[in-house]
């Protein structure tokens, strides 16, 4: 998230919370005055409800300001839990108020008869309350959804429940008024207390829902279904054999994701890192702002024999290439090239080859899979750039002529192109393109290239590096 985006988020959330404080002050004062004037427990209950809204709005106002602070040395995961704490505090305040409302309602229903004046001011007050509550709840819900803020959601719930509870109070006052008009005051006067009781039950129901979500966040309960979605998305990334562990937790409007994914052990460090980048991108398609940590675990599942050999060599820090293996009745034969430092002594280089062979035999030898022989070809690795010199045109012509002769003798070889010949130290570097029939299998292509290289090495013993780039014949050309 950019600095500008963060500033905009803080400003919008702060403005939504601040206007809620103002609205709660206005409604609390209005309901308290009219409730005392009319004697309506329903309106007084609503005044208490609005007073709690005011306390909640103040808590929310300070919570959203603190929760958006960046992580620091003492809060390494940020301050998002402050929002969850504020939502829980609001729940406790609401439940305490409901206890008083329920007590007073039962007192008026069963013991004490209180005279109520259902004046036009009472109805007007509750109508104003509904309008203000509707306006504030929409603004708060919009900001809560936009920034996934539980504190703002809690505030929005306060104002939205006020709409229903105010409607119930209006109905209760209407029954009291009806009782006055019909001369049945004793019966209908209790409708106001019943309305207050209904208001309290509504508030309790909503408070328990809100409190449950706050507690879930505080005890790091994963958002419902999110871990399963993330696991499914991560498992579809190439080279992810399976997802070993998924941990998800929320902190305010932030989501933290920890993943352990199994990857083939022969992957290089760079390749494994690329896999984790792809997994992170997949997770953020589900939760765009998630803070994701991915730990790749190398495993040997679905691994071929050549991959297995490469993995053994990599664990021992042996630089190998050109690895081949084949089976005979006597067992498996393994051939590979081992690169060592150019200035390494033959004795130490041979010791490395012996150690590699020992490791391969120890791990690959099985009762049903014997190792017939392991041939390690030692060669010097390139540690620096070698200066090359162009070959003379006359000498290059001799090479090109022999390449063309062999090309004509080898079936399916259609042309040679882009021949490069250079002197590297005491050897000759040769590279060229060999055009072959497109319908050949890759095994046939490899065999032709290998045959061409073997013929050239017999003709020119000074050859060092030979690179034959094979490509299919283009349509219309031979």
Image (tube, helix red, strand yellow):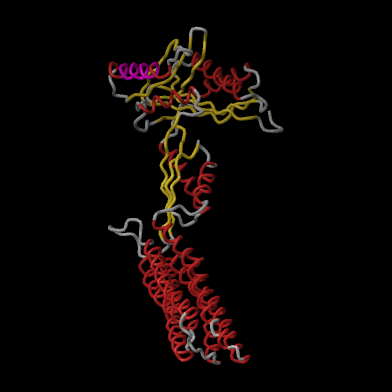
Residue 405, position as x, y percentages in the image: 60, 18
Q: How many marks?
A: 0
Q: Quadrant of residue 422?
A: top left
Residue 457, position as x, y percentages in the image: 49, 16
Residue 291 visible in the displayed image: no
Instruction: Say which quadrant the C terminus sits in.
Output: top right
Main SS of the magenta part reads: helix
Furthest-top residue in this view: 330
Furthest-right residue in this view: 476
Residue 209, position as x, y percentages in the image: 48, 63
Measured along the vertical axis of the image, is residue 380 above or below residue 10?
Answer: above
Q: Is residue 352 magenta?
A: yes
Q: Is residue 73 magenta?
A: no
Residue in the image at 48% along x and 25% along y: 430
Residue 43 visible in the displayed image: yes
Residue in the image at 63% along x and 19% along y: 408
Q: Quadrant of residue 374?
A: top left
Residue in the image at 35% along x and 16% along y: 358
Q: Is residue 352 left or right of residue 364?
A: left
Q: Nearer the viewer, residue 36 or 185?
A: 185
Measured along the vertical axis of the image, is residue 77 above or below residue 186?
Answer: above
Residue 364, position as x, y percentages in the image: 43, 18
Measured along the vertical axis of the image, is residue 171 above or below residue 358?
Answer: below
Residue in the image at 50% along x and 35% along y: 241
Magenta stretch in the rendered image: 349-361
């Amino acid at each position: 998230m950019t600095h500008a985006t963060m500033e905009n988020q803080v400003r919008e959330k702060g403005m939504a919370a601040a206007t809620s404080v103002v609205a709660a002050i206005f409604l609390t004062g209005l309901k308290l005055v009219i409730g005392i004037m009319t004697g309506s427990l329903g309106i007084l209950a609503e005044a208490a409800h609005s007073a709690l809204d005011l306390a909640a709005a103040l808590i929310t106002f300070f919570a959203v300001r603190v929760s958006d602070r960046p992580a620091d040395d003492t809060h390494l995961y940020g301050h998002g839990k402050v929002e969850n704490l504020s939502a829980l505090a609001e729940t406790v305040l609401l439940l305490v108020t409901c206890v008083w409302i329920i007590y007073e309602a039962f007192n008026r229903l069963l013991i004490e008869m209180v005279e109520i004046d259902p004046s036009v001011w009472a109805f007007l007050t509750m109508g104003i309350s509904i309008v203000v509550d509707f306006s504030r709840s929409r603004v708060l819900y919009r900001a809560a959804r936009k920034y996934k803020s539980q504190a703002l959601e809690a505030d929005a719930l306060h104002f939205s429940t006020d709409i229903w509870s105010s409607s119930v109070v209006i109905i209760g006052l209407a029954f009291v008024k009806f009782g006055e008009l019909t001369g049945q005051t004793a019966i209908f006067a209790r409708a106001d207390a019943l309305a207050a009781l209904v208001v309290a039950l509504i508030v309790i129901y909503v408070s328990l829902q809100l409190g449950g979500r706050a507690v879930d966040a505080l005890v790091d309960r994963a958002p419902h279904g999110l871990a399963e979605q993330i696991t499914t998305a991560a498992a579809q990334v190439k080279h992810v054999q399976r997802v070993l562990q998924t941990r998800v937790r929320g902190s305010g409007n932030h989501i933290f994701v920890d993943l352990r994914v199994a990857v083939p052990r022969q992957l290089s460090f760079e390749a494994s890192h690329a896999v984790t980048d792809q997994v992170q991108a997949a997770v953020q398609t589900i939760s765009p702002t998630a803070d994701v940590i991915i730990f790749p675990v190398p495993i040997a599942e679905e691994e071929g024999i050549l991959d297995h050999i490469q993995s053994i060599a990599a664990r021992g820090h042996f630089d190998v290439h050109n690895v081949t293996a084949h089976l005979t009745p006597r067992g498996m034969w393994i051939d590979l090239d081992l690169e060592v430092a150019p200035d390494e002594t033959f004795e130490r280089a041979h010791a490395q080859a012996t150690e590699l062979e020992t490791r391969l035999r120890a791990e690959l030898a099985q009762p049903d899979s014997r190792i017939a022989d392991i041939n390690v070809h030692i060669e010097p690795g390139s540690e620096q750039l070698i200066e090359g010199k162009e070959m003379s045109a006359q000498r290059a012509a001799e090479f090109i002529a022999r390449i063309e002769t062999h090309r004509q003798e080898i079936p399916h070889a259609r042309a040679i192109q882009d021949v490069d010949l250079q002197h590297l130290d005491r050897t000759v570097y040769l590279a060229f393109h060999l055009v072959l029939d497109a319908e050949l299998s890759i095994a046939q292509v490899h065999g032709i290239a290998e045959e061409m290289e073997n013929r050239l090495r017999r003709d020119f013993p000074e050859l060092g590096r030979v690179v034959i780039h094979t490509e299919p014949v283009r349509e219309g050309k031979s």
